Image (tube, grey):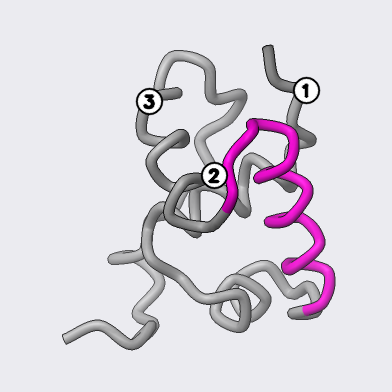
Amino acid sequence: MHGALSPREWQAAGLVADGLTNNAIAEVTGLSPHTIKTYVANACRKVGVANRTGLAAWYATQKSNRPVDWGFSISDLGLNHGGP
């Protein structure tokens, strides 16, 4: 079983799953990119995945376990995160 994610790790995991980069997540949350990198790395370690892709896939399987609805999604943010 994986370790419990903190609320910020859940938030970072969700935004990674939405396709945001660490810099974009930092912009959205008002935290530094370094802090976001730490949250993402900790979340990956706790859930037992090797990278952001694994974290996004894990997050997609956790709908009933997510602790909170952050109240926004990537489409609400109006950010261009490198996609088309």
Counting residues from the start of the chain, the first of labels 1 and 3 encountered is 1
**Quadrant location of the N terminus?**
top right
Mark 3, residue position: 61
Q: Is residue 60 left or right of residue 16?
A: left
The x, y position of residue 34, in whole percent, is 82, 77
Mark 1, residue position: 3
- Please tell me whether residue 43 belongs to the stretch shown in magenta: yes
Point out the frontmost of discs 1 and 2.
1
- Please tell me whether residue 47 belongs to the stretch shown in magenta: yes
Residue type at numbered disc 2 = Trp
Q: Secondary structure at mark 2?
A: loop
Hey, which residue is sitting farthest left in the picture? 84
Counting residues from the start of the chain, the first of labels 3 and 2 encountered is 3
Circles 1 and 3: CB atoms closer than 8 Å: no
Q: Image height check: is 80 above or below 25? A: below
Q: Image height check: is 84 above or below 21? A: below
- Gap in angstroms between the C-alphas marked 1 and 3: 16 Å
Q: What residue appears at the point 41 percent right and 52 percent down from the top-left corner?
A: 17
Quarter of the rendering containing residue 7: top right
- Gap in angstroms between the C-alphas marked 3 and 2: 17 Å
Counting residues from the start of the chain, the first of labels 1 and 2 encountered is 1
Q: Is residue 9 left or right of residue 54?
A: right
Look at the image and give the residue range highlighted in magenta: 34-50
The x, y position of residue 68, in whole percent, is 58, 30
Residue type at numbered disc 1 = Gly
Circles 1 and 2: CB atoms closer than 8 Å: no
